[in-house]
Amino acid sequence: ANIGAAQLREADGLDLARRAVDALEADGLIVHLNPLQEAVQPEGDRDWRGVLALIAGAARSVGVPIVAKEVGAGLSASVACALVEAGVAVIDVAGA
């Protein structure tokens, strides 16, 4: 299953993540992180406040490993460490 980190900020974001995992009988949930892409899109989501806490909530509640996938700009070591501390099992930076 796959969800954008910005989608987790929606009112039903964690529920949406759980439903996606359940509907697909997924073995994991990929949360894609794309703030640079969102920043340059006219309709992009620019408010990323609270996303780390929501990722931590997903890690506690969806029942499958969380994969954080950065799409295009890479991750700093401090962000990678924060994601692991939040419960992320895998960090995918392929192509970054």
Image (cartoon, rainbow, N blue to C red):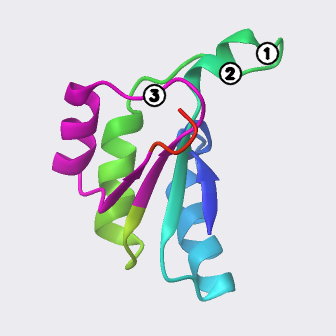
Query: What whole-number distance in Å separates the C-alpha atoms at marks 1 and 2?
Result: 5 Å
In the displayed orientation, state which residue is furthest to the front.
95
The amino acid beneath tag 1 is Gln
Q: Residue furthest bottom?
A: 25
35 shown above or below 32? above
Q: Which portion, as a residue range, is magenta?
A: 67-92
Q: Which numbered disc, 1 or 3, marks the residue closer to the eye?
A: 3
Q: Residue at x 60, y 89 (%)?
A: 25
**Which comes sooner in the sequence, label 3 or label 2?**
2
From the image, tell me which residue sits under label 3.
Answer: 74
Q: Is residue 72 magenta?
A: yes
Residue under label 1, please give it.
41
- Between residue 48 and residue 88, name the one nearer to us: 88
Q: Are marks 1 and 2 in contact (CB under 8 Å)?
A: yes
Q: Provide residue 65's location: percent of width, then percent of height.
A: 37, 71
Given the current orientation, which residue lies at the most extreme right position? 42
- Left or right: 84 with respect to 93? left
Q: Quadrant of residue 62?
A: bottom left
How far apart in space, not on screen, are marks 1 and 3 (Cα)? Answer: 18 Å
Q: Going 57% across and 82% down the picture, which residue do you hit?
A: 26
Secondary structure of the residue carrying tag 1 is: loop
Question: Where's residue 59, x and y in %?
Answer: 33, 62
Q: What amino acid does circle 3 point to?
A: Gly
Question: Residue 34: image x %, image y %?
Answer: 59, 30
Q: Of circles 3 and 2, which is in front?
A: 3
Question: Is 72 above or below relative to 29?
Answer: above
Circle 2 crowding by C-alpha within 10 Å: few under 14, some 14–19, many from 20: some
**Residue 74 relative to residue 81: left or right:** right
Which SS class for mark 2?
helix
